[in-house]
Amino acid sequence: MKYLITSLFFLVSIVQAEQFQAPITDTQWLVTESPLKCSMHQDITRFGGAEFSQIPGGEFNLTFTTALYPSQKTDIYFEIAQAPWQNSEDRLMLVAIPVEKNQQTFTITGKIAKQAFTYIKEGMFPTIRYQSQNSMEEISVLLSTVHFRDSHIAFTQCVEQLTPYTFEQMQKLTVYFNSEESVLHSEAKQALTRLADYVKIDDSIRRITVSGHTDNHGRKRLNIPLSAARSLAVKVFLINECDLDEAMITTSFHREFVATTSNKTGSGRTQNRRAEIELIR
C-alpha cells in the first residue's frame, strides 16, 4: 500500500459529512495485554471500531475497521480534529492513503500512527474521512479522547513488556554436537530455554518437531542410534528442564542423509552434527 505523506501539516475544512463518534458519556478504551500483542480498542457507534496496536518487532499501528461503510476506490484521509466544543471544523492533515473498492480496514503505521497517539494524549481527535459505497455523504469518523488517559498507561506498560522475539525468529533453531556425541552444550541449552519460554506464551504453537542428524564420519550402523540420541537429547531437555508438554514434541532421525553442507571438510562436518527444531502452528 503506497502512502501519500504530506511534507507539512496543512488545514482542511470539512464540509457536509456523515459523522461517527463514540458517545461522550459512554466511551470505553479496552486494553488487551499479552507478551505477543498490546492493543487499545474503542467501539464507535454505528460505524465499527478503532485500535492502536503493537506486536514484537512490528510497526506501531492505528487501524479503523467497519463492516457497514466499505470504501469506494478513492483516498482515505487521516487527520487531527479539534475538540468539538471548540466549534472549529478545521483539521490537521496527517496522511492520505489510496484504498480499494469495498475496503473495510484502514491502517496507518509507524511514525504517523505514533503522531496520532500523541495528539490524542494532548486532547485532540484522530479522524478518518473518505467516500463510502453505502453513503451519499462523505464519511467522517472521530476517535474520542474520553477515558484515554485511564487506559493508555496500561497500554504503554504492555508495549514495554512485549517479548523481544517474534515467531519468525523462534520458528527454527539448530543446535550442534561434538563428533560422536549427543550431549547438549551450555549454548544449546540456553537457546532451547529461550525457545521453550516463547512456546509458553504463544498459544498458536501446536507442535514442535525435532530431527537428529550426523556427519558421514564413523560407522554407518553407529550413526543411526547417534542421530536418534541427538533428537532425544533435545526432547528430554525441553520436557524435563523446560516443562514443555511431551505430547507436542515429535522426533525423527536421519543420520547423514540430510546434510546442510558438504561432509568433505571439517567445518562442513561440524555443521552437519546437529539437531533441528521447528515450531509448527
Image (cartoon, rainbow, N blue to C red):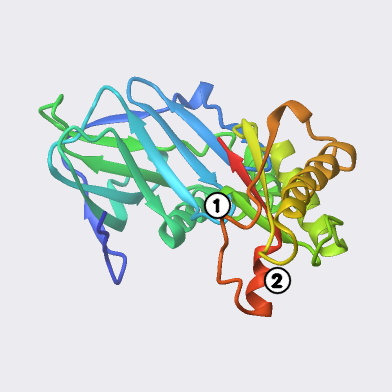
The label shown at residue 168 is 1
Badge 1 element = helix
Q: Quadrant of residue 18?
A: top left
The label shown at residue 270 is 2
Closer to us: 168 or 2: 168
Q: Where's residue 206, x and y in %?
A: 62, 30
Badge 2 element = helix
For marks 1 and 2, the one nearer the N-term is 1
Q: Is residue 208 left or right of residue 234?
A: left
What is the spatial separation of the Cα atoms under label 1 and label 2, in whole angstroms? 25 Å
Q: Is residue 207 left or right of residue 108?
A: right
Image point (78%, 52%), residue name: 226
Image point (45%, 62%), residue name: 111
Image point (13%, 31%), residue name: 137
| Residue 184 appears in the rendering | yes
Q: Where's residue 223, x and y in %?
A: 73, 54
Numbered-mark total: 2
Q: Name the front one of labels 1 and 2.
A: 2
**Image: 185 above or below 240:** below
Q: Tell me the quarter of the image containing the C terminus.
A: top right
**Image: 214 above or below 125:** below
**Image: 263 above or below 90:** below
Image point (37%, 37%), residue name: 64
Amino acid type, residue under disc 2 in the picture: Thr
| Residue 37 appears in the rendering | no
Amino acid type, residue under disc 1 in the picture: Glu
Closer to us: 76 or 210: 210
Q: Where's residue 105, x and y in %?
A: 32, 37
